[in-house]
Amino acid sequence: MAKKTVQKKARKHQQQGPMVVLYNLDAGTSRGDAVRAALAELGIRTRAITAAHLNDSVGSIAGMVGMHPSPKPFEGEAPRDEFMLVCNMPGKQLDGMLAALRQANASIAHKAQVTAHNRLWPMHVLMAEIAKEHAAMTKPNE
């Protein structure tokens, strides 16, 4: 593929705007609907994933150019935690989104942003890392 075509596709992805990927926040549930409503009010797109997507890379789930779903299905016990993956969102907008979720009483404990570091990780690995970090940060002092 020509270099200009690759750059054009990369710009197209960047122009797609922010998106939030939701796991265990199903439509039709009070928490899932509250999160979706708060995000919709801000004009932020959402995408729901299931355990079937957990072996896919973070970048693939985020829709990054050149990243593809894993051909190998996820095996193992699916996480039960709610999870939010923030894609293509600048810092000020992220702060506003988090404030809106708090105000709507729809804050999600386990969340991450797509980064250059984690984009190649399988989604289940990112979710496990965030769960460990959350547990360490909320652990009572001994």
Image (spheres, rainbow, N blue to C red):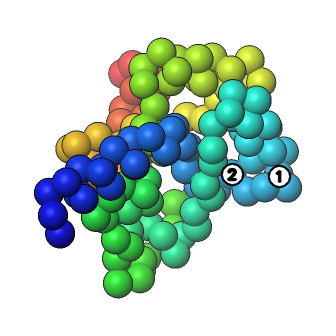
Image spot of residue 141 (x, y percent): 39, 19
- Viewer-nearest residue: 38 or 134: 38
- Viewer-nearest residue: 130 or 140: 130
Circle on res. 126 = none
Horizontal side of 123 relative to 121 (left or right) equals right
Regarding residue 76, the answer to whether it shows in the image is: yes
Image quadrant holding the N terminus, namely: bottom left
Image quadrant holding the C terminus, namely: top left
Circle on res. 29 = 1
Query: Which residue was labeled with disc 2?
Result: 25
Q: Residue at x 55, y 34 (%)?
A: 109
Are the residues tagged 1 and 2 within 8 Å (C-beta)?
Answer: yes
Image spot of residue 55 (x, y percent): 38, 71
Horizontal side of 62 relative to 27 (left or right) equals left
Image spot of residue 21 (x, y percent): 55, 50
Q: Residue at x 73, y 57 (%)?
A: 26
Amino acid type at image mark 1:
Thr
- Viewer-nearest residue: 25 or 95: 95
Amino acid type at image mark 2:
Leu
The CA span between labels 1 and 2 is 7 Å
Q: Secondary structure at mark 1?
A: loop
